[in-house]
Amino acid sequence: MVCDLDANTLIGLAADCPGLATALADVTDEADVARLFKSVDQCLGGLDVLVNTAGVAGPPCGVGAITLAEWNRALVLKLTSQFLCVREALPRLRMAQQLQRSRRAHGGPCILNLSTATGQHGAPGWAAHAAFKWAVVGFTKTLAVELGPEGIRVNAILPASLPGAGSIADRSPLSSSTLRRQADPVDLARTAVFAASDRAAGITGQSLLVGGGGRMLA
C-alpha cells in the first residue's frame, strides 16, 4: 500500500501496479495519519512493514537565509511525519509479531526509515535537510533498542546519491562515488526488500548506506 499527497500520482501507480492499494494522505497531519492507518486495516488487514519515505531535499540555501517557517516545515516533513506514522504503526506491528511467532517466522515485522548520508558528512546550503534527516538515524537507533525485545526490527536506509530535480546529487560529480555511478530508486527498493525479509532477521538499529559509495544525497 502506498500513500501520497498527489491523487494523480496514486492513479498512475495503481494503473502500473495492479492490486496495489493506495491512499491519499498528508503524513505531516496527525488526523490524516490516523485515517491512513484505518485504511491500512481495511485494505491490508494488518501491517508487517512500515517504510517511512516522505520528504524532499531543502530548503536549498545557507543557514542565514532559512526562515523559521521553512525550518519548521522541514522538521515536520522529514522527522515528525516519521514519528506520527511509527506511533500509529506500532500496535499493528505488535499484533503482526504475535501472529508471526505462532507461525515460526524469523524476520518479524519491521520499520524502515529513509534518512540521508548528507547528515553524516555535511553539505553547504542544506542545513535543515541534513539536520532533520540525520535525526532520523537517532530516532531509528532508539526505536531499535526499544522495540528489539518485542521482536520488531528498525533500520534506516541512507541514500547517498540520487538524481532528481534540484537534488544535491545533481550538483555533485560522480567522482564522489567509489562505483562512479549514482544510486537509483531500484537500488533503494532492493535494499528495502532485503531489509524487510527473513534474510535480514538479525539486522536492526543499522544505517544502510546506498549510493555507490557516494557521500551526498538527493
Image (spheres, helix red, strand yellow):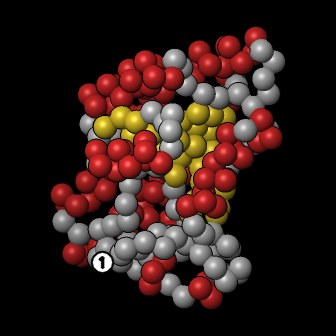
Direction from residue 46 to residue 29 in the image, left or right: left
Task: Give the percent coordinates (x, y) of residue 36.
Answer: 36, 29
Direction from residue 95 to residue 57 in the image, left or right: left
Q: Residue at x 72, y 18 (%)?
A: 100
Residue 82 appears in the rendering:
no
Vertical relation: 103 (above or below) 208: above
Vertical relation: 172 (above or below) 23: below
How crowded pointer 1 is (Cα within 10 Å; few <14, some 14-19, many 20+) is rated as few
Q: Residue at x 67, y 45 (%)?
A: 193
Task: Give the percent coordinates (x, y) of residue 141.
Answer: 60, 44
Q: In this rendered view, identify the residue nearer to me: 200 or 79.
A: 200
Residue 101 appears in the rendering:
yes
Direction from residue 48 to residue 83 in the image, left or right: left
Task: Give the percent coordinates (x, y) of residue 107.
Answer: 75, 31
Q: Which quarter of the picture shows residue 166?
A: bottom left
Vertical relation: 208 (above or below) 34: below
Most extreme residue toward the top is 102
Q: Residue at x 37, y 60 (%)?
A: 56
Determine which residue is flagged by label 1. 62
Q: In this rendered view, identify the residue nearer to me: 215 or 141.
A: 215
Vertical relation: 162 (above or below) 38: below
Task: Give the percent coordinates (x, y) of residue 190.
Answer: 67, 53
Q: Residue at x 36, y 34 (%)?
A: 23
Q: In this rendered view, identify the residue nearer to me: 2 or 114.
A: 2
Direction from residue 52 to residue 106 in the image, left or right: right
Q: Which quarter of the picture shows residue 24?
A: top left
Amino acid found under the numbered disc labelled 1: Gly
